[in-house]
Image: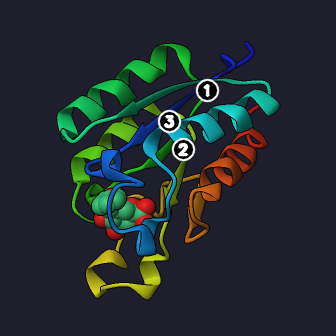
Amino acid sequence: MTSPRRLLLVNGPNLNLLGMREPGIYGAASLADVERLTADAAAAAGFELRAIQSNHEGVLIDAIHAAREDCAGIVINPAGLTHTSVSLRDALTGVGLPFAEVHISDVYAREEFRHHSYLHDVAAVRVIGRGVDGYADAVRELTALIP
Ligand code: CA2
């Protein structure tokens, strides 16, 4: 059976503030810009994109569960939940879809508490510190793994 030609883009807590605050760390692009550039990269690879951003962990987990029905993979910037959430890791491993973990900033050049990721050993792709262009790189690297 061929995989559905759709990806889920998940942006975690506070990423709705992109472009509004802390441009020195996260750049000037807005969340809408990120969703557009990621959809463009997905389209170039032959995939549709469904995008969600939420500040609520359970909403993100429900969206990941739903992706099992009609998506071939997930691109996720879990934001602060990267460093705290076993539940998010369990959701991602539970649905069994390949996923790319994206971080806009270079988490390894920042505070020590950002160096640990609960997803790092289960992500198919990791893109870190390439700014918002990292989302497009993640789509290219992830879709290359989808049959
Ligand atoms: O670099 C990334 O993409 C992060 O996932 C962003 C998270 C941070 O907790 C991770 O350590 C690294 C924070 C997202 C908050 O986004 C904001 C954007 C603009 C202004 C304020 C926060």
Label 1 – label 2 distance at C-alpha: 20 Å
Residue at position x 32%, y 62% from top? Answer: 21
Residue type for callout 1? Ala
Q: State yes or no: discs 1 and 2 in contact (Cβ < 8 Å).
A: no
Count of marks, rendered view: 3
Residue 111 location, x and y as percent? 30, 85
N-terminal label among 3 and 1? 3
Residue 77: image x %, image y %? 43, 51
Binning the other alpha carbons within 10 Å of mark 1 as few (below 14), some (14 to 19) or many (20 upward) gives many
Front residue of 21 and 43: 21
| Residue drawn at point x = 37 percent, y = 84 percent | 110
Ligand 1 quadrant in view: bottom left
Residue 114 placement (x, y as % from top left): 32, 76
Residue type indicated by callout 2: Val
Of labels 1 and 2, earlier in sequence is: 2
User: Residue 34 shows which numbered tag?
Assistant: 2
Q: Nearer the viewer, mark 1 or mark 2?
A: 2
Lateral position of residue 85 relative to residue 20, left or right: left
Disc 3 to disc 2: CB gap under 8 Å: no
In this orientation, which residue lies closer to the viewer: 97 or 49? 49
From what the image shows, is residue 36 above or below residue 100?
A: above
Q: Is residue 18 left or right of residue 71?
A: left
Q: Which residue is mark 1?
A: 72
> Which image quadrant for residue 33?
top right
At 39% from the left edge and 53% from the top edge, which residue is drawn? 18
Q: Which mark is residue 9?
A: 3
Q: Nearer the viewer, mark 3 or mark 1?
A: 3
Marks 3 and 2 sit apart, C-alpha to C-alpha, by: 10 Å
Residue at image position (18%, 38%) is: 56
User: For numbered disc 1, what is the local secondary structure?
Assistant: loop
Confirm whether residue 19 shows in the render: yes
